[in-house]
Amino acid sequence: MFNITGDDRLKNEEISLETKKALALSLKKAMRQKNFSKITVKEIIQDCGVNRNTFYYHFDDIYALLRWVLTEEAINVVKHFDLLVDYEDAIRFVMDYVDENDYIISCAYDAIGRDEMKRFFYSDLIEITSSIINSADEKSKKHLEPEFKAFLANFYTEALAGTLVDWVKEKQTKDKETIIIYLKRIIETYLSLF
């Protein structure tokens, strides 16, 4: 009978994270060279030196790997901001990330389209938006109805996800600083209602 210690579990988690990072790096490398729809699991595993079973142990498909990349590199970082205080820094971080990694976003956009890309962002951003709304509600002690808070979270998340996706495709015509200012004003206006 095996007795797995906490140290063994920690070591396995570290190895798993390193494997995910290696797969992510291979995906990003491939995305610099070709369209997302042309990238195969075979080329990712060959590039990072793991077998097919290892890939599928960690991810269901390439889309799951892409989601992990975006979540790990951007969304999880934003969750560590105090969003009631540092919302401008959080917005700037996301915009800078999208700007620096536009080849990833553009490649994915070309493969799955605007609506799917928006849904992709939405599923991660809804948690962040809900957190801001819940924190503002707690701070103001207004105790908004849960249905209304859910409506607000959906409304703002749809707008934010759509804005990010549109900006990726129209960066040449839309200035990042202007978008940041507009998003900051929207959040400030919303928070002033509390």
Image: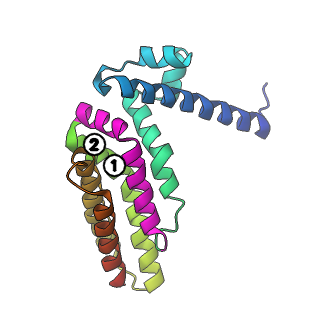
Q: Nearer the viewer, residue 170 or 77?
A: 170
User: Which residues, given as a range, are shown in magenta?
Assistant: 85-112
Q: Quadrant of residue 148?
A: bottom left
Q: Position of residue 117 (x, y in %)?
A: 27, 42
Q: Is residue 101 magenta?
A: yes
Q: Quadrant of residue 186?
A: bottom left
**With respect to residue 91, does 32 lie above or below?**
above
Mark 1–mark 2 Cα distance, whole angstroms, equals: 6 Å
Question: In the image, is 78 to the left or to the right of 107?
Answer: right
Q: Which residue type does callout 1 highlight?
A: Phe
**Residue 44 in the figure: left or right of residue 165:** right
| Residue 117 numbered mark, or none | 2
Question: Do the residues bearing badges 1 and 2 touch, measured as CB atoms within 8 Å?
Answer: yes
Amino acid at circle 2: Met
Query: As rendered, which of 77 and 14 lies closer to the eye?
Result: 77
- Magenta includes 47? no
Q: Position of residue 130 (x, y in %)?
A: 39, 65
**Residue 160 in the image: above or below residue 49:** below
Q: Is residue 8 visible?
A: yes
Residue for point 52% across, 53% down: 77
The structure residue drawn at horizontal position 39% and vertical position 72%, both measured from the top left corner, is 133
Q: SS class of the residue under badge 1?
A: helix
Residue located 43% across and 77% down the image: 136
Disc 1: CA contacts within 10 A as few (<14), some (14-19) or many (>=20): many
Figure coloring: rainbow
Check the picture and name the quadrant holding the C terminus.
bottom left
> Taking 156 as reference, is 51 above or below it?
above
What residue would you read off at disc 1? 121
Is residue 52 visible in this depiction of the protein?
Answer: no
Q: Residue at x 50, y 29 (%)?
A: 25
In the displayed structure, 22 sits above or below 149; it is above
